[in-house]
Each structure stands twice: as structure tokens, then as C-alpha cells.
Amino acid sequence: MDRRQHRRAGSTVLAVGILLGLGTGATGCSGRGAAAEDVKGPGDPVGTLHRAADALRAAGSSKAGTSMEMATGGTRVTIRGRGVYDYRHRLGRLTVMLPEDPTGASEHRPITELLTPGALYMKNRGAGVPADKWVRVETATLSDGNLVTGGATDPYAAAEVLRGTREATFVGRTVLAGTPVRHYRGTADLSRAARYASAGNKASLAAAAKGFATALVPFDAYLDDQGRIRKLRQRFSFVNGRQKATVAVASTLLLFEFGIPVDVRLPAPADIYAGRIAEDGTGGDGGGGSGSRDSGGGA
């Protein structure tokens, strides 16, 4: 690998190779849904955003498109994904595409990700993992709660971040991909979101509240007339543990074709890799990969 390719690989690893390497575990918070006093009626932006995750559960399922932009030290990396999500069972499947190298060739095969309550499964992870094996990660053990680690934010977790909305304004009506939507802009508090999140997301959001540079998440949300998220852009920031530099992350989620059939099947225990994860796929300094985390375990 020449020096230019190594620098590019390092930036890609910063974006996805921080998998398993952002921090230690966190404990969950207790709580029961959004408090009654948070719901001030359908005309209140804060109350409407608190209920956005519930509207997705009512919709049942959808297709999803994701985009994650990371910037640090003048380097910008964009990772895109596409897939489906079952909101009632909290199961999703995404195909995540890593950036191309400077020559235009793909640096990595698409990563298949299975999203479940409390765990992330990845295939084609690289970093020494056999191509036919899955890596399993407990999301509560990641200091970002897997809001950015996998290169895509879990759609339902992103919606539950909105349960922590403290302030929001109604920007106006617009049309998104032919669908009339309401545009809201505001700030969510990850600590508050963890308190009111579903059982599967409590520990992950609590970890993110502690692990990010700030627990406050600015966002722009576009909801349809049923209160379902059609587009959600959230901005996170964390400190890269090795370089001590603040990394800015913008995660954008697009949801469409609600109610489609979704069948997500988790890998068998024998198909889950239980060996050592290299720091990056080339053996160089990946900027945060964990070399010793045990990835085995069932769903």
C-alpha cells in the first residue's frame, strides 16, 4: 500500500474502523416512555417529535437510506447505506458502502449490517474476519451507543433520540420526494432520550450520552401528516481517542415505502466470528479498532 492509499485507508477506518474501538460499557437508565407532561398536543413541535418513534412503530416497517459524513482535521468521509427496517420487532438490514479510494476503485466490499435491540451484526467486516463470518457487537459497550460506529445510525434509535427533544421550532411545510412534510429544527438531549427510550435502546443511548463530546444533538426532522419520519439529519461530535481530535458527524436518514414486508434473519451461533479483530484491514494504525474484543455470542 503506498502512502496516499494508507492515508485514505486510515480515514475510512476512522469512519468505520472505529467499530469496536470507541469505548467501554455503559449502564442503562430507568424510565417509562415520554412523560405525560411532555405531550402538549398535536400542534406542539416538542410533543410531536417525542412521538415520532411511536409513529414508526405504528407504520410497521419501511425502506431506509442512510448517509454518514465524518470530518476531522480537513479529512471528510461519506458512508452510504440502504436497506429495510421492521419497527415493531426492532430488526433491520442495511448494505453499507464504504468510500472509494482516490483511483476510483472500491476499498472494501459492501458491509452487510443486521440491526437488533442491543446488538449489531456485520458481515464483510474485514480486519481479519473471515468473509463467511459475522461479527457481533453489543451496542451498549460502544461509547457512541452505535449511533455512528457502524457507519449508519439505526433508524429506530435515531427516532428515539428525538424523545430527548428539549427545544424545537416548526420551520414550515415542504415536499420531500413527492410527499408533503413538516420541517422541524431543534436540539435533543441524549441523557433525556435514554430515560424515555424503549428497553432495547436505553443502555445504548445512555452510553452515547456519556461517550460523545456533548450529549446535545442538533437535528432537522421532516415528518409526514401521520407523524412518521421521512428525513432526519442529526449532528454528533466525539473525541477521537488516539488523536484527541474532535470528529464531527452528520447522520442523515431517509425513510420511505412504509408497510413493506421485511424478513430479517439473524446468523446462527456457528456463523459468528469469535476471534481477534485486527485494528484495521491492512494491519496499520486504524485510529481506534479493538484488537481484543470477543465478538462471539448469540442474539
Image (cartoon, helix red, strand yellow):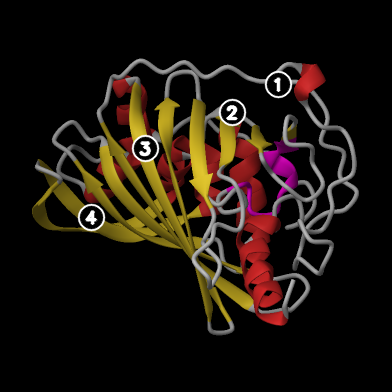
User: Relative to the observer, which residue lies in front, 51 or 60?
Assistant: 60
Residue at x 82% of width, y 58% of height: 279
Residue at mark 1 to residue at mark 4: CA–CA distance: 36 Å
Distance from label 3 to label 2 (Cα)? 15 Å
- Label located before the other in sequence (1 or 3): 3
Q: Nearest the camera: 48 or 246?
A: 246
Mark 1: secondary structure: loop
Is mark 2 in CB contact (under 8 Å) with mark 1? Answer: yes
Q: Is residue 113 above or below residue 271?
A: below
Marks 1/3: CA–CA distance: 23 Å
Q: Estimate the x, y position of residue 27 in percent, counting from the top left.
A: 73, 42
Does label 3 or label 2 sit earlier along the sequence?
3
The reply, left or right, for residue 162 in relation to residue 6 is left
C-alpha separation, residue under disc 2 versus residue under disc 4: 28 Å
Q: Nearer the viewer, mark 1 or mark 3?
A: 3
Report the amino acid beneath label 4: Tyr
Range shown magenta = 136-146
Which of the numbered marks, if any, corresponds to residue 299?
Answer: 1
User: Does residue 77 appear left or right of residue 281 in this picture?
Assistant: left
At label 3, which amino acid type do we have?
A: Ala
Mark in front: 1 vs 4: 1
Q: Identify the amino acid type marked 2.
A: Thr
Mark seen at residue 116: 2
Task: Please indicate whether residue 222 sits to the left or right of residue 80 in the image.
Answer: left
Quarter containing the N terminus: bottom right
Which quarter of the picture shows residue 84?
A: top left
- The residue that mark 3 highlights is 64
Verify CB contact (< 8 Å) between mark 4 and mark 3: no
- The label number, if any, that marks residue 184 in the structure image: 4
